[in-house]
């Protein structure tokens, strides 16, 4: 039987350590200019918007202490892989990671 829990997004899990959770986020720029008609000559300057970044991916666990994450950035005019890695929980205090993950920059 598959269990579904809500943890920011639906997380699907099954006995034995299997789980799958979709993930994503979007950053949108929105600008609006409103000014009196005598400053703009009666011309409306309006509203503009664009998607700066759009991330989609998934993560989960596998039996035996393994985990995975895949995340793709669809923002701008390119598609880039941000995170593609596997993890192994060797003990309560040690988790090993192999693959590609984006740097932790703010």
Image (cartoon, rainbow, N blue to C red):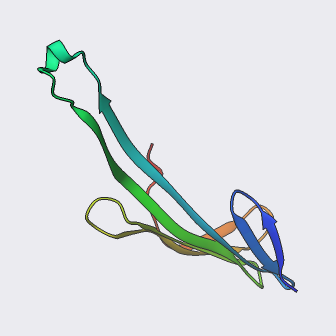
Residue drawn 52% across and 56% down? 25
Q: Can residue 87 be seen in this view?
A: no
Depth order, front residue of 1/18: 1
Q: Is residue 87 rendered to the left or right of residue 102?
A: right
Residue drawn 25% across and 19% down? 35
- Asked where in the image residue 79 lies, by quadrant, the reply is bottom left
Depth order, front residue of 40/88: 40
Image location of residue 94, percent across then percent down: 72, 65
Image location of residue 82, percent across then percent down: 43, 66
Question: Residue lying farthest left?
Answer: 41
Q: Is residue 65 rendered to the left or right of residue 99?
A: right
Q: Is residue 70 rendered to the left or right of residue 52?
A: right
- Asked where in the image residue 20 lies, by quadrant, the reply is bottom right
Which quarter of the rendered picture does the C terminus lie within? Answer: top left
Depth order, front residue of 69/12: 12
The number of numbered badges drawn on the structure is 0
Q: Is residue 12 rendered to the left or right of residue 38?
A: right
Depth order, front residue of 46/48: 46
Residue drawn 44% across and 47% down? 105
- Asked where in the image residue 19 lies, by quadrant, the reply is bottom right
Q: Is residue 51 visible?
A: yes
Which quarter of the rendered picture does the N terminus lie within? Answer: bottom right
Q: Where 75 falls versus 1 (above or below)?
A: above
Residue drawn 46% across and 62% down? 55
Q: Where 22 falls versus 49 (above or below)?
A: below
Image location of residue 102, percent across then percent down: 44, 61
């Amino acid at each position: 039987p598959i269990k579904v829990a809500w943890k920011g997004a639906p997380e699907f899990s099954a006995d034995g350590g299997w789980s799958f959770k979709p993930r994503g986020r979007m950053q949108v720029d929105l600008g609006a200019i409103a000014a009196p008609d005598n400053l703009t000559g009666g011309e409306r300057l309006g509203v503009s918007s664009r998607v700066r970044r759009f991330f989609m991916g998934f993560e989960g666990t596998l039996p035996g202490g393994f985990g995975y994450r895949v995340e793709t950035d669809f923002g701008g005019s390119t598609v880039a892989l941000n995170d593609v890695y596997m993890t192994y929980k060797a003990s309560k205090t040690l988790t090993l990671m192999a693959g590609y993950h984006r740097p932790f920059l703010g």
